[in-house]
Image (cartoon, rainbow, N blue to C red):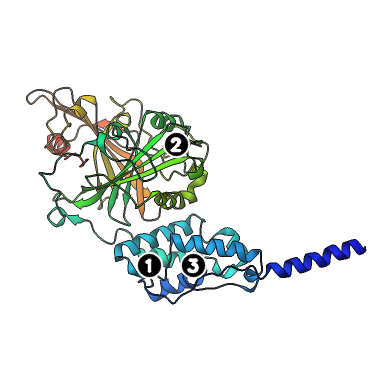
């Protein structure tokens, strides 16, 4: 008993001594708080400021070492990623983007940290508070720019030599072959008025087609291309100026420290590597952590394959009958658009002959004989992985145009629940519309 008593006494002394090993948590007055409504700021202050601000808000039990060390680490990491008391120094669009990401983290249950909420019950974001944040952000409330109001890219700018694009700051090489990869999905981003086209290399496409994406196999490469949205004279929203392309490269061992993926982003037609150094990767991994159960991939591939879990693949959008004359989802994508009035999205696909006729995307399309175009139109639904985004849902129509010499080009349309063929009276008009769709801009 004497030995146990002595050990207990030593433990108490050691515990007391550790309380003095207390590195500071820097604090300072707010210099540029986020610009938001009072209701939104009240929610952020209650639920987020404990970690994501320069204020020091510790409960009494947070002050006790070793809990203090853990809390301090979480606060410093959280501030580095998002700090609401300095966010106001950024442009309004950047503030809005950060708030969208924060709301998405809350919606997916990643923030506030579950272990933090377990001890700090007041920090739980209620459904009513989340609804208030979403209503404040109101995606799609800001219409896309018109073609006349969009800053044009320089027509005389030299073409980017894809093979000479420099690697990212983390060493990830730019893949010059990405423009030839096959489409996996599309996204209509109402949070920032952009389109995203997600492409995959052969390994990624085969994995999606078989449902083998939990996890994705080594060698899979995904490219996410972004364009500004532009409202056309036809009332449809089309891809405007090219914004960036992002890569995810799967190699579980090589990229073990970054969740099994290599990350990269190149912005603008000159494809400038993103960030100032290799630390930009922490933005990528932090953003994708809420979907770690889906191998850190937000995209739901359009496929008929089953993946075993809900909201891992997009089976609805991939439900095209085998009776169609062609299976366009296996072709390359030429462009896409959204009809805001009907809440539909469409992607224009082309067979190999059609794609060879589009080597120069800066020119009006001139499809040669043997080219086949397919315009697939889907209803839209909310993206379950990203608040403020919509993805394809149920296919509504599939239209085919087969180019031939002279006036012998043909048009066929398939509509309805079973995508059965019909014979519209405006077939000539539709054929012309499809053939005149401008290819989306690429470097």
Q: Position of residue 116 (x, y in %)?
A: 58, 63
Q: How far apart are marks 2 and 3 (CA)?
A: 33 Å
Q: Is mark 2 on a helix, strand or loop?
A: strand
Q: Is residue 138 visible?
A: no
* Farthest left residue in view: 406
Residue 248 in which image quadrant: top left
Taking 367 as reference, is 288 above or below it?
Answer: below
| Front position in the image: 20 or 415 | 20
Residue 407: x and y, percent? 7, 26
Return the residue at label 2: 250
Q: Quadrant of the C terminus?
A: top left
Q: Is residue 179 above or below residue 115?
A: above
Residue 23 sits in quarter: bottom right
Residue situated furthest right in the rendering: 1
Residue named by callout 3: 48
Residue at screen point 29% across, 65% down? 91
Mark 2 / mark 3, whichever is N-terminal: 3
Q: Is residue 292 left or right of residue 350?
A: right
> For the residues marked 1 and 3, what is the alpha-carbon distance in whole angstroms?
13 Å
Based on the displayed image, in which of its 4 quarters is residue 263 positioned?
Answer: top left
Q: Note whether 198 is above or below 81 in the view shown.
A: above
Image disc number at residue 87: 1
At a point 56% along the width and 65% down the height, the residue shown is 72
Which comes before the other along the chain, label 2 or label 1? 1
Which is closer to the viewer, label 1 or label 3? 1
Q: Residues within 10 Å of mark 3 (few under 14, many from 20)?
A: many
């Amino acid at each position: 008993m004497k030995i146990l008593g002595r050990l207990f006494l030593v433990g108490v002394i050691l515990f007391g001594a550790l309380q003095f090993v207390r590195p500071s948590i820097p604090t300072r007055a707010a210099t540029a708080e986020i610009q938001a409504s009072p209701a939104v700021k009240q929610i952020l202050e209650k639920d987020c400021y404990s970690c994501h601000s320069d204020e020091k808000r510790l409960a009494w039990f947070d002050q006790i070492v070793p809990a203090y060390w853990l809390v301090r680490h979480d606060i410093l990491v959280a501030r580095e990623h998002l700090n609401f008391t300095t966010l106001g120094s950024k442009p309004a669009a950047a503030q809005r983007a950060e708030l969208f990401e924060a709301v998405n983290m809350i919606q997916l249950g990643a923030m506030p940290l579950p272990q933090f909420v377990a001890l700090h019950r007041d920090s739980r974001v209620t459904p009513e508070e989340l609804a208030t944040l979403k209503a404040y952000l109101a995606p799609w409330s800001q219409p896309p720019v018109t073609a006349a109001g969009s800053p044009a890219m320089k027509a005389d700018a030299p073409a980017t030599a894809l093979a000479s694009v420099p690697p990212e700051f983390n060493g990830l090489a730019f893949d010059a072959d990405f423009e030839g990869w096959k489409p996996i999905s599309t996204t209509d981003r109402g949070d920032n008025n952009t389109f995203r086209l997600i492409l995959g290399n052969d390994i990624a496409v085969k994995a999606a087609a078989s449902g083998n994406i939990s996890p994705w196999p080594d060698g899979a490469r995904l490219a996410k291309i972004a364009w500004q949205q532009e409202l056309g004279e036809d009332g449809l929203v089309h891809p405007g100026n090219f914004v960036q392309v992002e890569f995810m490269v799967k190699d579980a061992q090589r990229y073990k420290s970054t969740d099994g993926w290599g990350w990269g982003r190149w912005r603008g037609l000159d494809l400038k590597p993103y960030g100032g150094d290799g630390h930009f990767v922490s933005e990528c991994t932090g953003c994708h952590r809420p979907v770690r159960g889906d191998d850190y991939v937000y995209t739901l591939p359009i496929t008929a394959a089953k993946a075993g879990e809900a909201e891992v693949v997009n089976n609805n959008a991939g439900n095209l009958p085998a009776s169609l004359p062609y299976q366009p989802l296996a072709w390359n994508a030429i462009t896409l658009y959204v009809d805001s009035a009907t809440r539909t999205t469409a992607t224009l696909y082309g067979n190999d002959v059609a794609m060879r006729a589009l080597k120069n995307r800066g020119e009006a399309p001139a499809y040669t004989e043997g080219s086949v175009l397919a315009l697939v139109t889907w209803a839209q639904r909310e993206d379950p992985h990203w608040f403020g985004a919509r993805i394809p849902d149920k296919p509504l129509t599939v239209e085919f145009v087969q180019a031939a010499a002279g006036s012998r080009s043909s048009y066929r349309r398939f509509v309805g629940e079973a995508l059965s063929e019909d014979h519209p009276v405006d077939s000539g008009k539709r054929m012309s519309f499809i053939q005149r769709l401008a290819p989306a801009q690429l470097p």
